Amino acid sequence: MTRPALYVTRILPDPVMAAIRQQYRLISEPTDLPLAPNEQRKFFAQANAAICTLTDRIDAALLSVASRLEIVANYAVGYNNIDVAAARARGIVVTNTPDVLTDATADLTWALLLAVARRVVEADVWLRSGTWPGWAPTQMLGTDVTGKTLGIVGMGRIGQAVAQRAQGFRMPVLYASRRSCSSQPGAPAWTHRSLHEVLKNSDFVSLHVSLTDATRHLIGPRELAMMKATSFLINTSRGAVTDEAALVSALQAGKIAGAGLDVYEQEPTVHAGLTALPNVVLLPHLGSATLDTRVRMGMICLENIAAVLKGQPAPNRVT
Ligand code: DGY
């Protein structure tokens, strides 16, 4: 029996590629680099199923050539890269990879928060430069994290996982979200507030909304001006949730104390104003980047594809 034709836009971790090779006919050998749009079109036209990543723009024009395609499994929880309405109109199922990357992304959010508060990257660079003169009482002074107020914007799975970790730092949690939610039984309560209240009263503001028309530039000049001059902005969601130019201006003017960013408006381009600032920690979109997590994400894509190609409901179909 011929195996279904699968198009994988980028090379995935070995265990996932091994499972793919066992079950599917690969239309083309994926590499670590994005393909040119005309090549993508050629492969979409042949595929029964596709695994794509957040860097692939799956728009109506691309889907219009995909006459055999039954499913696009997005190798990410966010799916702002896909025109879901256009897929639905063509009867193509779109799935994502929720849950399996929640902890990895929440952990990385804390890595950024701690790194920017305690100047970890700046200090590491200084030490490696060979110019550290030895310990001194006023050297590289950072900001306390323990006991400070954590503000979370978007209290979905990842926002909640970030909030749970705040208990270890005895941090009160304020959150802005469409829905209210509760901390675990026995844990300190989280306080539901408007976005503006969260921005005004938090020492660290961490963004966890998905990118939609409603959340694009949710954090702009007005919102940044509401934050305390001593506060920090952390973003592991999507770059365009923040107006990056406004963030650079706010940082340059000292309207906020610093930022920890994993995501950017125009990846892989990063605003030159950000790279010039010492009080900003910048990571190359590593939220889910652990081997375990990236393998689990791949296996979820395969579960969804197997279900759809058998005519069954996809476990992670997006709305
Ligand atoms: C996601 O899944 O949306 C993450 O950004 C991937 O790292």
Image (cartoon, helix red, strand yellow):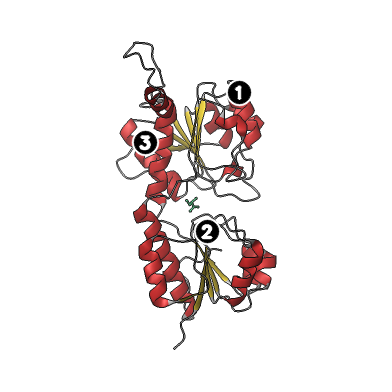
Residue at mark 3: 166
Apparent side of residue 312 relative to residue 19 in the rendered image (left or right): right
Task: Please give the residue where the numbered disc 2 appears in the rendered image.
Answer: 53
Residue in view at x 40 percent, y 44 percent: 106
Q: Quadrant of the C terminus?
A: bottom right
Left or right of 1? Residue 221 is: right
Can I make out residue 279 in this image?
yes
Q: Is residue 13 left or right of residue 250?
A: left
Q: Of circles 3 and 2, which is in front?
A: 2
**Residue type at the position of mark 2:** Thr
The residue positioned farthest toward the front in the image shown: 130
Residue 75, how many percent across, how many down? 48, 60
Query: Measuring 34% from the left and 55% from the top, which residue is drawn there?
Result: 292
Q: In x, y percent, where is residue 198? A: 52, 33
What distance separates the C-alpha of mark 2 from that of mark 1? Answer: 33 Å
- Cβ–Cβ under 8 Å for marks 3 and 1: no
Name the secondary structure under disc 1.
helix
From mark 3 to mark 2, how far is it between C-alphas? 30 Å
Q: Which residue is mark 1?
A: 252
Q: Nearer the viewer, residue 178 or 29?
A: 29
Front one among 281 and 305:
281
Q: Residues within 10 Å of mark 3 (few under 14, many from 20)?
A: many
Which badge, 3 or 1, is on the more N-terminal residue?
A: 3
Label 1 beta carbon less than 8 Å to ligand 1? no
x then y, percent, for residue 183: 37, 43
**Element assignment for label 3:** helix
Image point (55%, 46%), residue name? 238
Ligand 1 within 8 Å of the CB at mark 3: no
Q: Nearer the viewer, mark 3 or mark 1?
A: 1
Of callouts 3 and 2, which one flags the residue occurring earlier in the amino acid sequence? 2
Sequence order check, earlier mark of 2 and 1: 2
Q: Position of residue 55 (x, y in %)?
A: 56, 55
